[in-house]
Amino acid sequence: MITFDHITKAYGDNLALDDLNLTIESGEIFGLIGHNGAGKTTTISLLTSIIEATEGHILVDNLTLAEHRDEIKKRIAYVPDSPDIFLNLTAFEYWHFLGKVYDVPKEDVDQRIGTLSTLFDMTARQYEPIDSFSHGMRQKTIIIGALIPNPDIWILDEPLTGLDPQASFDLKQMMKEHARGGNTVLFSTHVLSVAEQLCDRIGILRKGRLIFVGSLEELKSQYPDKDLETIYLELAGRQQEKVGEEA
């Protein structure tokens, strides 16, 4: 279980997150939804210890992140929103590097590389530098690297961006299987149809504030005469801004 307890992240006078209170249960796929700048990547960056909160606490299974950072980081697989990292390494070198970081035995790393590189059609290119890859291949490389340690918490920031349809399907199936095993998947997306396919619950962020938490069925039941896109835009888009200006 992951808990964001009154989390605020400020950059000067700008609040990237404003008093976020959210609990993500073990065994669920939770989707963060919102426009660019809504706070999705900030939320993920706080949980992955890339940045620190200005106020509040993050807990993982009742362990405070600030006090158990190294222990919690070992439990997290992270796919960032950009795959343009470690470009001078080959894919194979990058995967083994992550295996060492997570203390995964070499034989297990080799076995998982074999399985995952075959699944994502990367076997023939694994000894080439990441810099030579297309965006989609870089994305596959980062996803494979994140999954090699196979920790219980998967945190994926726009993970499907750039993937071909087969790779996208395979990753979604893996996300479902991981959650069915009692583990946690937290991911961000702009694509409402993906959230509808995958998520047990979603959280909608707007300008750093959490404006809805629940299942998509619960959300749609509140607006029975509207489609999902219209509901979302009324909550988080420019239509809501106009309503606020008129009020």
Image (tube, grey):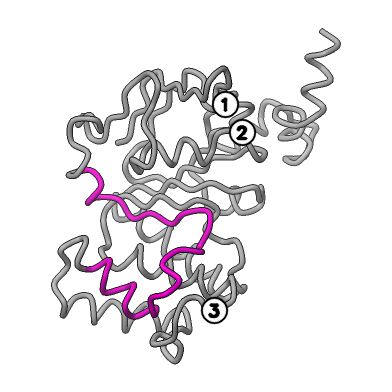
Q: CA distance from mark 2 to mark 1?
A: 5 Å
Eyeballing the image, is 129 above or below 15? Answer: below
Looking at the picture, which amino acid does disc 2 mark? Ala
Q: How many numbered circles are shown?
A: 3
What kind of element bears circle 2? Answer: loop
Residue positioned 46% across, 25% down in the render? 9
Eyeballing the image, is 71 above or below 215? Answer: below
Q: CA distance from mark 3 to mark 2?
A: 30 Å
| Residue contact at pointers 3 and 2, CB within 8 angstroms | no
Position in image of residue 231 (x %, y %): 74, 33
Eyeballing the image, is 24 above or below 177? Answer: above
Position in image of residue 43 (x %, y %): 46, 35
* Residue that numbered label 2 is attached to: 38
Looking at the picture, which amino acid does disc 1 mark? Gly
What kind of element bears circle 3? Answer: loop
Question: Residues in magenta?
Answer: 72-99
Q: Residue 95 appears in which quarter of the rendering?
A: bottom left
Please give the label number shown on residue 133.
Answer: 3
Specify whether 117 is left or right of 42: left
Position in image of residue 114 (x %, y %): 31, 84
Q: Is residue 168 magenta?
A: no
Which of pointers 3 and 2 lies earlier in the amino acid sequence? 2
Q: CA distance from mark 1 to mark 3?
A: 34 Å
Q: Residue 230 appears in which quarter of the rendering?
A: top right
Of residues 18 and 184, the one nearer the viewer is 18
